[in-house]
Image: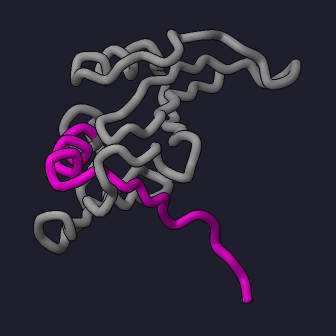
């Protein structure tokens, strides 16, 4: 058996309304492509192409639940500040303003974090 890498990350929205906001955010605001949708109401699902992996969004989470099991989604970008501004314009609260860091001498990065429409934490990640 061999593995070919990550296929998708699943994000549970908290009901149909949060599901719709989340799909609009990733496709409309951030500009990723919607691959497919299925189901209705609180059994709705969607897959969004993030470029090198797929984000599966499900409407099966319940209001009041903690955010998903993964700590955050890191999205590669060439403009952290612009990406965060897009998210903020869509109503996403900032968790961490754009910051320059180093992950070792030869790996400078710029990152920022916000909270997405389903309560997920989103990191905008730029290699320098």
In this view, the residue in front, 124 or 117, is 117
Q: Residue at x 61, y 17 (%)?
A: 110
Looking at the image, residue 56 lies above or below residue 26? below
Say how many tags the image has: 0
- On the image, the x and y values in percent for residue 55 come to 40, 56
Q: Residue at x 58, y 63 (%)?
A: 6
Q: Residue at x 51, y 10 (%)?
A: 97
Question: From this viewpoint, which residue is outermost toward the right?
Answer: 105
Quadrant that contains the N terminus: bottom right
Q: How is the image coloured?
A: one colour
- On the image, the x and y values in percent for residue 128 come to 65, 19
Looking at the image, residue 7 lies above or below residue 27? below
In this view, the residue in front, 75 or 120, is 120
- On the image, the x and y values in percent for residue 60 come to 29, 63
Looking at the image, residue 72 lies above or below residue 110? below
**Residue 127 as seen in the image, left or right of residue 31:** right
Start and end of the magenta stretch? 1-25
Question: From this viewpoint, which residue is outermost toward the bottom?
Answer: 1
- On the image, the x and y values in percent for residue 71 come to 58, 42
Question: From this viewpoint, which residue is outermost toward the left?
Answer: 40
Residue 40 in which image quadrant: bottom left
Residue 61 in which image quadrant: bottom left
Looking at the image, residue 15 lies above or below residue 88? below
Residue 25 in which image quadrant: top left
Q: Residue at x 86, y 23 (%)?
A: 104
Q: Is residue 14 magenta?
A: yes
Q: Is residue 3 magenta?
A: yes
């Amino acid at each position: 058996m061999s593995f070919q890498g990550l296929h998708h990350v699943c994000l549970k929205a908290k009901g149909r309304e949060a599901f719709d906001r989340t799909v609009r955010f990733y496709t409309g605001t951030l500009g990723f492509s919607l691959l497919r949708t299925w189901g209705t109401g609180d059994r709705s699902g969607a897959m969004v192409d993030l470029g090198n992996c797929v984000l599966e969004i499900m409407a099966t989470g319940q209001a009041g639940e903690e955010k998903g099991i993964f700590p955050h989604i890191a999205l590669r970008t060439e403009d952290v500040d612009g990406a965060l501004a897009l998210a903020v314009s869509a109503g996403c609260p900032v968790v961490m303003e754009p910051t320059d860091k180093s992950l070792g001498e030869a790996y400078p990065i710029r990152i920022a974090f916000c909270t997405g429409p389903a309560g997920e934490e989103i990191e905008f990640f730029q290699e320098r």
